[in-house]
Amino acid sequence: MRGGVVGALAPFAVFLTGVGWLALMGAPDERGFWPILLAAMATGIALARDRHRYCDALLAGMAQPIVMLMIMAWLLAGVLSTLLGASGFVEALIWMARSGGVSGGGYVAAAFVVCCLVATSTGTSFGTIIIGGPLLYPAGAATGADPAMLIGAILGGATFGDSISPISDTTIASAGTQNADIAGTVRARLKYVLPAALVALVTYAAIGDGADGVTASALAAAVGRPDGLPMILIPVMVIGLLLLKRHLVESLIAGAVGAIALGLALGLLRPDQLMRFEAGSFTARSLVIDGLERGVGVSIFTLLLVALVAAFEATGTLTRLVSGGVRVTSAARAESWIVATVSAAVLLTTHSVVAILAVGPLASATGARAGIGAYRRANLLDLTVCIWPFLLPYFLPTILSSNATASGVALGMPRISAFDAGFHNFYSWALLVIVVLAVATGFGREESGPRRSPPAAASPYAL
C-alpha cells in the first residue's frame, strides 16, 4: 500500500469516520453503511500499489465459506421470524407476559436471562440475536418495556453466551491458542462473567421500565392472544437441532418448514400467504419473500465489510502491528499488551476469532515468559473480544440487533440504531470494567493452566 501502515489503515479510517457520522445522525439501518463501505473500498483501491491484487483480495474475502454461512443465516432467520410473526407467535408471547404480570423492567430482565440461556446452550451469539430478537422485541410493546433497554438486554444475553459457552467459537479459539483445556478455561472465567451478568440483570430490572417509544394506541391494542402458543415448538426445535450439532443452515430451514407445516395445520397460516401472484404488476408476494427481503440489508453489509477486512489482512499490516509484544516481560505489562493488542485486532478486523488467532501465538509466548498462566491468557483474549463487537455500531452483533427491531414496528415499537443497541448492552460495559480492574489490580492472575498439554483444540470454524 502507498504510505505503508498509514495507507493500509486509511480505508478503515474512512469507514470509522463514516460510521461515527451515521451514529451521530441516528444511523437509520444497516443500508446506511453501504455507501460508507464503498467509499472505504475506493480509498483502498486508490492507495494500492497493485490494484488488481487488491481487488482480488476484496473478492476472495467475499467468497469465504464463513461469509456464505452468515448470509444464509441472515436470510433464513428472516424467513423464520416472518413466518412465526404471521402465525401469531408474538401475540402469544404478549399474552403470556400480560397473563403472568410481567411488565417493564421485569420483561427486559426476563429477555436477558432467556438469551443468556439460549446463547450459552448453543454457543452462538449471532444465532441467538437472529432467532430471539425478532420474537422477544415486539412483545415488549405489551409490557411498557423501554425499547432500547430491551434490545440491549437481548444483545447482552447473546454476549454472555458467547463469552462463557464451552462450544462458543471464541472459547475454542482462545483456549486452543494458549494450549489450555476448555473445561478449566471456562471454570476460571466464571469469576469475571457472573458478576458482569448480575450487574446487567439488576440494571435491566431496575431501569427497564418506560414506554416512551411506544404509542399509547399500540400499547392498548397489544393484548395478545394464546392461539399461536403452539408455535413455540418451532424455536425450541431449532435450538434443539443446534444443540445436537446440526448445521445452522439445516436447523433454520427445518424451522421454516416446520413453521409452515404447523401453521397450516393449526389454521394460523393461510396457503395464499405463502405464495400469491399479482398479475397486473407482474410480481409475486409471499411471507417467504418478505422474510428473505428482511435479510438483504445485513447480507450486503456483511459482504462489503468482510471484503474490506480481507484486503486489509492481505497487506500483512496486522501481523506487523501485533509483533511488538515479544519485548514485554512483566506480568502487568504483558496483560496490558494482550488486552490492548487483541482489542486493536478486533477493532480492525471486526472478527473475534480472526483477532484471537492473530494475537494468540504471541500472547502465549509473551504471557508465559511473564509468568501468566494459560487460563488467564485465554480468558483475557476471550473476554476482550466479547466487549467491543457487542458495543460499537459497525460490528455485526449490533447491526443484527438493530435489524431485529424492525420486527416490532407493526406493534408500535421503534427502530433502534446499532449505536443505541450497543450502548444499552450493560453486560459488555460491566465486562469492560471487570477486565480493566483485573489487569490493573491483578485479580485472577493466580490462574495457572493445565499441568499437561491437552489435545489439540478443534478449529473454531467448525462451528
Image: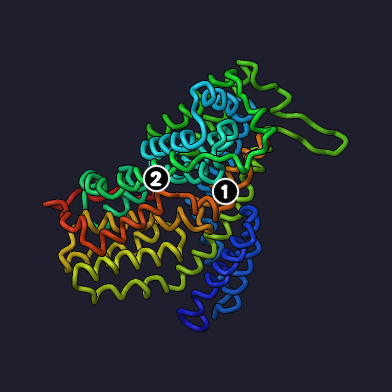
* Residue 418 horizontal/vertical position (percent): 55, 53
Q: In the rendered view, would you say 103 is above or below 332? A: above
Are the residues tagged 2 and 1 within 8 Å (C-beta)? no
Which residue ends up furthest to the right in the rendered image? 280
Residue at (49% x, 54% y) in the render = 423
Name the one closer to the observer, 451 or 437: 437
Which residue ends up furthest to the bottom in the rendered image? 3
Indicate the secondary structure of the residue bearing disc 1. Answer: helix
> Split into 4 quadrants, where in the image is the C terminus?
top left
Left or right of 435 on screen, residue 247: right
* Residue 297 horizontal/vertical position (percent): 63, 50
Crowd band around label 1 with a 10 angstrom C-alpha radius: few (<14), some (14–19), many (20+): many
The residue that label 2 is drawn on is 200
* Residue 405 horizontal/vertical position (percent): 59, 43
Q: For marks 2 and 1, give the CA distance.
A: 19 Å
Q: In the rendered view, would you say 2 is above or below 282? A: below
Indicate the secondary structure of the residue bearing disc 2. Answer: helix
* Amino acid identity at mark 1: Ser
Which residue ends up furthest to the left in the rendered image? 451
Residue at (49% x, 53% y) in the render = 422
Q: Nearer the viewer, mark 2 or mark 1?
A: 2
Inspect this view and state whether residue 422 appears: yes
Q: In the rendered view, would you say 78 is above or below 100? A: below
* Amino acid identity at mark 2: Ala
Count the marks: how many?
Answer: 2
Mark number for residue 402?
1
Residue at (16% x, 53% y) in the render = 449
